[in-house]
Image (tube, helix red, strand yellow):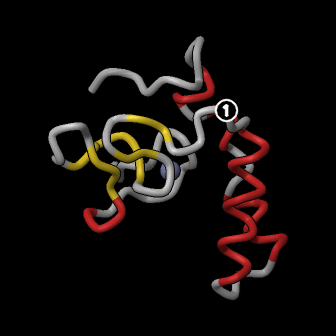
């Protein structure tokens, strides 16, 4: 099964992986959500992530209805299921 970012749901290819404090790539979060062991948008809600993703995708030429379909499961991702969405879970 393909890995995806546990914060925004984008496919976690090697070139979009976030970084941990020691500089190694994260297996959980993408670089748009996570860098140097912290979330880039710690106060974000799932709705913010969805909005952000839809805008990013539509800039790349995706129709908005399709982008919205792609991100509809964002609130079910592990980051938003844990108690404190401001802190990354341990790897
Ligand atoms: Zn992400």
Q: Is residue 17 above or below residue 55?
A: above
Of residues 18 and 10, the one nearer the viewer is: 18
Quarter holding residue 53: bottom right
Q: Is residue 57 above or below residue 7?
A: below
Q: Is residue 23 above or below residue 15?
A: above
Q: Residue furthest top?
A: 83
Location of residue 73 in the rendering, given as x and y in whole percent from the top left corner: 68, 43
Left-right relation of 30 to 15: right
| Mark 1 burial class by Cα count in 10 Å: few <14, some 14-19, many 20+ | few
Location of residue 4 in the rendering, given as x and y in whole percent from the top left corner: 43, 49
Location of residue 43 in the rendering, given as x and y in whole percent from the top left corner: 67, 32
Left-right relation of 25 to 37: left
Q: Residue at x 15, y 39 (%)?
A: 22
Q: Residue at x 54, y 50 (%)?
A: 9
Q: Residue at x 51, y 57 (%)?
A: 10
Element at badge 1?
loop
Task: Please name the residue that numbered disc 1 is placed on.
Answer: 43
Of residues 41 and 72, the one nearer the viewer is: 41
User: Is the residue marked 1 within 8 Å of ligand 1, measured from its CB?
Assistant: no
Q: Quadrant of the C terminus?
A: top left
């Amino acid at each position: 099964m393909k890995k995806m970012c546990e914060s925004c749901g984008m496919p976690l290819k090697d070139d979009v992986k976030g970084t941990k404090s020691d500089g190694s790539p994260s297996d959980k979060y993408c670089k748009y959500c996570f860098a140097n062991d912290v979330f880039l948008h710690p106060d974000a809600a799932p709705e913010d992530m969805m909005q952000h993703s839809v805008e990013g995708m539509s800039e790349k030429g995706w129709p908005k209805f399709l982008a919205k379909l792609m991100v509809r499961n964002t609130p079910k991702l592990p980051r938003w299921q844990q108690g404190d969405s401001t802190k990354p879970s341990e790897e």
